[in-house]
Amino acid sequence: MGPKRLAQTLVVDVAAERILLAFHKEGDMQGCYTGFLDELLEGETPESGAVRITTEQCGLIVEQAELRAVFHFTGEDYPGADEYEYYATSYRGTLRESVEVRPQWFELDQIPYELMPADDALWYPPFLAGKLQRGSFHFGPGMKELLRHQFSEVDELVF
């Protein structure tokens, strides 16, 4: 069995220059903001998983999700995960809080990186600027401290 497979969706309101983030109320990310993030189901494609996860966590139905990054995460006490990062600007539905997360809009220039996993401040800016990326991040115990990373822009994402 390989690493976990995760998908994350960053919902962006381009006209209002804001991003919808999820404040995690439970689980591994408790107390942090991220995009809408969870593990893929057996046999699920990353894109369909990203759409499902977003709907389950905040009620919005993503109409189009653009894959912009693929990262591999490991840690001193974490076996590893491949994470597919999606960008979504087309969505419908009614925003709501769920058991797992409380969604909150932030201006793009006021993203709360200090309340997010350490890797996010590195890859969000090029991701939001439309760059495709591939890379890896390695964390210390408890996935709190980023020990090393490497990522780069790529011309296409193939998995």
Image (cartoon, grey):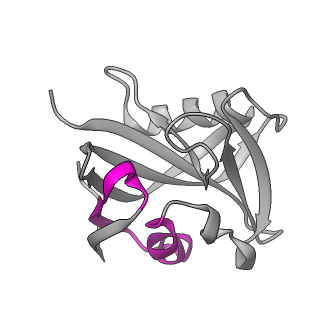
Q: Position of residue 113 (x, y in %)?
A: 61, 70
Tag count: 0
Q: Tell me what residue is drawn at x 29 percent, y 65 percent.
A: 134
Q: Position of residue 42 (x, y in %)?
A: 33, 20
Q: Tell me what residue is drawn at x 31 percent, y 21 percent.
A: 43
Q: Is residue 100 magenta?
A: no
- 101 left or right of 4 in image: right
Q: Position of residue 128 (x, y in %)?
A: 56, 71
Q: Position of residue 111 (x, y in %)?
A: 68, 70
Q: Is residue 136 magenta?
A: yes
Q: Which residues are magenta?
A: 118-144
- 17 left or right of 153 in image: right
The answer to which image quadrant residue 112 occupies is bottom right
Q: Tell me what residue is drawn at x 77 percent, y 72 percent.
A: 17
Q: Nearer the viewer, residue 140 or 96?
A: 140
Location of residue 28 with respect to 143 vertically, above or below: above
Location of residue 81 with respect to 156 vertically, above or below: above
**The furthest residue to the top:** 42
- 112 left or right of 2 in image: right
Location of residue 78 with respect to 99 vertically, above or below: below
**The furthest residue to the left:** 1
**The furthest residue to the front:** 141
Q: Tell me what residue is drawn at x 14 percent, y 26 percent.
A: 1
Location of residue 5 with respect to 155 vertically, above or below: above
